[in-house]
Amino acid sequence: MYKSDTICAVATGMGRSAIGIVRISGKDAVDIADELFRGRKRLREMDSFRAAFGYIYDGDVKLDEVIALVMRGPHTYTTEDTVELDCHGGPLVMKRILELLIKNGVRPAEPGEFTKRAFLGGRIDMTGAEAVMDVISAENDMALRSSVEQLSGSLRKCITEMRDRIIRETAFIEAAIDDPENYSLNGYEEKLSEIINDIDHEILKLIETGDEGRIIKEGVRTAIVGRPNVGKSSVMNMLTGTDRAIVTSVEGTTRDTLEEYINLNGITLKLIDTAGIRNTDDIVEKIGVERALESMNEADLIMLVLDSSEPLNENDKELIRNISKRKYLVLINKSDMEQKLDMDELSQLDSSKFISISAKYNEGLDEIRDAVRKMFFAAEIDFNNQIYITNLRHKNALISASESLGRVKESIAAGLGEDFYTIDMMAAYESLGEIIGETLEDDLADRIFSEFCMGK
């Protein structure tokens, strides 16, 4: 199906814009577009990567003036003949052109189908396909750079090299079993053990980047917690630069969690302003407290807000006990007021994570920014030398491959036969193949591409 019919979609957003692009791909793309296009040149007579100015007609009705770009396979994104019609970016005109194409035998593309054809045509592997969507959805500079690096093939190269080493040793073992006169396995276990250890070490290094990779892509889940009326909502407003949260002097104003994304010097933070945590008989407030505790448990970073103008109470002390083994910052708020907080009562926490702030006067923002970067990224990220795993599917496949190689090492240590080695080596080979799409099941591939935007 994916190689026999011609598909079309609007490749730009359907809102108003200066330019809109309607993309057509498939064996009949040039011929069908040529029937609808009128200009000085016939599209079917043009060489690849040439453009022509003209008009799109529905019978005798002129729909729009366009620039038609002709690209002939296999040197295209989908590896098929492709035509892009650059028309005016009004939703109605793009809709009319799309309807005209469908009337002339072109099928509306499914989400991600252009990229799926690129994958099936061998132009990109699955890591490249997923990187395409990551580039589109990137919300900070680090996520964009990581996605572009993956799009260039860095992860594919790493995985392919590991698979090549595994299959080479597997083939040698099989050859030695079938032809022992010409291939000797004497002393081979020591050599194989070194190779397997090297490959597993590379896999484990990739797995270790998973948490940082997720944070690069999705942002740092940050829960702003504290007892009522310490200034959590004011901290939220300071970080977002807006009056996002309602601020009053009345305790319990925030009854539910409030979420907002911010870009803090290239790092995305998913901020969660929570209800004040305290013992309460109010049913609604109690639900808010439960959600606050849930957000706290799921957070990558906890920002505990304390009121420096008041002594600690039991709710403060309970929160301090709960965060001591987590990644946290202690924001000592209201630095513009007389300090009544006894710092000795915070001795169980790391004083290097204390930041004195005044949310009311936006003081302390730079210190928070620097602390977050230092906490999650020990050094400036160099995407030329480090691959970051930002996809949970990739991480799970790597874990599976590492487990298989672990069984190979156990078999070597136990002195089992070489045929035991190859079973688990091939299992690792298959798991790594899932990452680049070499051994990907069709239903999983369909599910991956269904998450793409329309027209990509």
Image (cartoon, grey):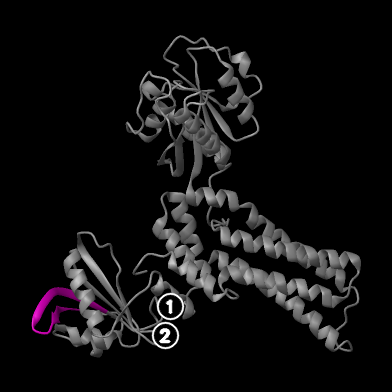
**Which amino acid lies under the numbered mark 2 shown in the image of this protein?**
Lys
Toward the viewer: 58 or 376? Answer: 58
Q: Quadrant of residue 55?
A: bottom left
Residue visible at 36% across and 85% down in the picture? 5
Is 187 on the left-hand or right-hand side of 375?
A: right
Is 384 on the left-hand or right-hand side of 241?
A: right
The quadrant of the image that shows the N terminus is: bottom left
Measured as percent of width and height from the top left, residue 34 is found at 21, 86
Look at the numbered disc 1 and give the secondary structure of its residue. Answer: helix
Whether label 1 touches label 2, CB < 8 Å: yes
The stretch drawn in magenta includes residue 123:
no
Residue visible at 56% across and 55% down in the picture? 388
The stretch drawn in magenta includes residue 57:
yes
The quadrant of the image that shows the C terminus is: bottom left
Q: Where does label 1 land, which residue?
A: 117
Q: Main secondary structure of the magenta part?
A: strand
Q: Residues within 10 Å of mark 2 (few under 14, many from 20)?
A: few
Q: Which residues are magenta?
A: 51-69
**Which amino acid lies under the numbered mark 1 shown in the image of this protein?**
Arg
Q: Where does label 2 land, which residue?
A: 3
Is 229 on the left-hand or right-hand side of 88?
A: right
Q: Quadrant of residue 298?
A: top right
Looking at the image, can residue 220 be seen? Answer: yes
Label whose residue precedes the other's in the sequence (1 or 2):
2
